[in-house]
Amino acid sequence: MSPRPAARCAAIGSSPTVALSDLVRELRARGADVLDVGGGDPDFDAPAHVLEATARSVLAGFTHYTPSRGVPALRAAVAEKLAADNGIKVDPDHEVLVTPSSKHALFAALMAVLDPGDEVLLPTPSWVSYQAMARLAGATPVPVPLTASDGFRITAGRLATAVTARSRALVLNTPNNPTGHVVDEREAEEIVAFAGRHDLVVIVDEIYEKIVFGGARHLSVASLPGAAERTITVNGLSKAYAMPGWRLGYAAGPAELVAAMLTVHQHTVACAGSFAQQGAVAALTGPQDAVTAMTAEYAARADAVVTALNALPDITCGRVEGAFYAFPDISATASPDCREFARRLLAEESVAVTPGVAFGPGGQGHLRISLTSSRPVLAEVVARIARVAQRDRRHAGVIGGASPFR
Ligand code: PMP
Ligand code: GLU
């Protein structure tokens, strides 16, 4: 008899974004020429001074375990950054935890906060792993459906439809993957007041903080009056500094919750990578011009892609305020099921996109296009999306399922 894996793993399944990136790697290794706008890995390299600091620390033998909360210099850099950029004041010795990836910080936060049977409010569409992590913690994710028509705003009214006596936490992501929405001040105040009324812990994933465009301004929920005592802020180096391979993130929040996260962390990873932490110190304390340059390029790509998509018949795409994804609505095409659209794009046009429904039921009918490819590649992706939509329209006309005049 072969060993049986735990039911929780079968119930959760693989990460759609990570599995798609693995599939693309596999297809490319077999010689396929795939345009990959599926995953969220920046196409830039980390700044040179970060590479040098990381390499120097390896060569100097900084290759052992570190203090489990993170090296003091990095915790100090994080506390300074949070004060300067985010208006969040934390004690680096008790209220900061350095983690191997922001993914692990989120997991430790959910494990530290949730008891089995608790409910977590998840405004959706939302990044694929929150609901999986909540389930791993034995809790129940409760989607709070948002709508494209008002730019995916979170309101107290919407949260009220999902909250119950068992609700224990709310997970926010701003700027948002996949919708591109950036929470504004009025929205943040409403969320904080709601969390206070229902005694919720707010876990805010700010990993795309630096990648905001045009008029949008990132606001940290924990900086609002009365929010810090119930908010865990999570951030990381993967996106802003193009450092996903360092697997480096951090969390800041009330000392008691950070101590509970430390328990999860000490028993699962002990500490973040030693030389990765030195690279992170260089990233946070060194020149920030690479971050500005990458963000400017993402902004130009967002503009170009949104404009090109909106010029296509039957496809609409909202403004991207932040993060690096376009999230067009393809539900008016003759192939309204986004999973099927994505499957056909890969099979017929060798383009990998993530179907919107991977981000919860609110994402049905959308595709997520990662803006981590050059503008010419993105233009080609849009052209291929147009071809699939066109082909669908012609077939629909011939088959007679839908009006050829739509
Ligand atoms: N949060 C969001 C919203 C993301 O898109 C990602 C990307 N993987 C992460 C967290 C995790 O980032 P990392 O683990 O690389 O720090
Ligand atoms: N955050 C990226 C994405 O959404 C990377 C993959 C992942 O960790 O989910 O595609």
Image: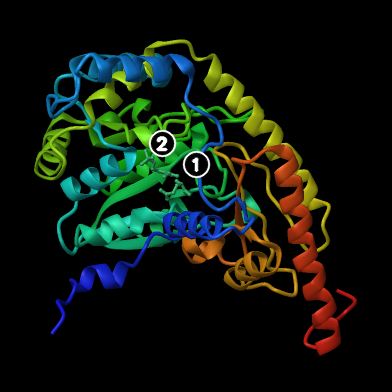
Quadrant position of residue 252 = top left
Task: Decide: few, some or many residues near mark 2? Use Cα within 10 Å; few <14, some 14-19, many ≥20.
Answer: many
Q: Is residue 165 visible?
A: no
Mark 2 is on which residue type? Pro
N-terminal of the two: label 2 or label 1? 1
Mark 1 is on which residue type? Asp
Residue at position x 62%, y 61% in the image: 366
Establish whether ligand 1 lies closer than 8 Å to the Cβ of label 2.
yes
The tag on residue 214 is none
Left or right relative to 168: residue 242? right
Vertical arrangement, residue 159 with respect to residue 331, above or below: above
Establish whether ligand 2 lies closer than 8 Å to the Cβ of label 1.
yes
Residue at position x 33%, y 49% in the image: 170
Looking at this view, name the residue that lies furthest to the bottom. Answer: 400
Q: Pick the quarter of the image with the C terminus.
A: bottom right
Q: Position of residue 270 (x, y in %)?
A: 13, 36
Q: Which residue is mark 2?
A: 244
- Contact, mark 2 vs mark 1 (Cβ under 8 Å): yes
Vertical arrangement, residue 394 with respect to residue 175, above or below: below
Q: Which residue is mark 1?
A: 41
How far is the residue under mark 2 from the one under mark 1?
7 Å
Vertical arrangement, residue 393 with respect to residue 186, above or below: below
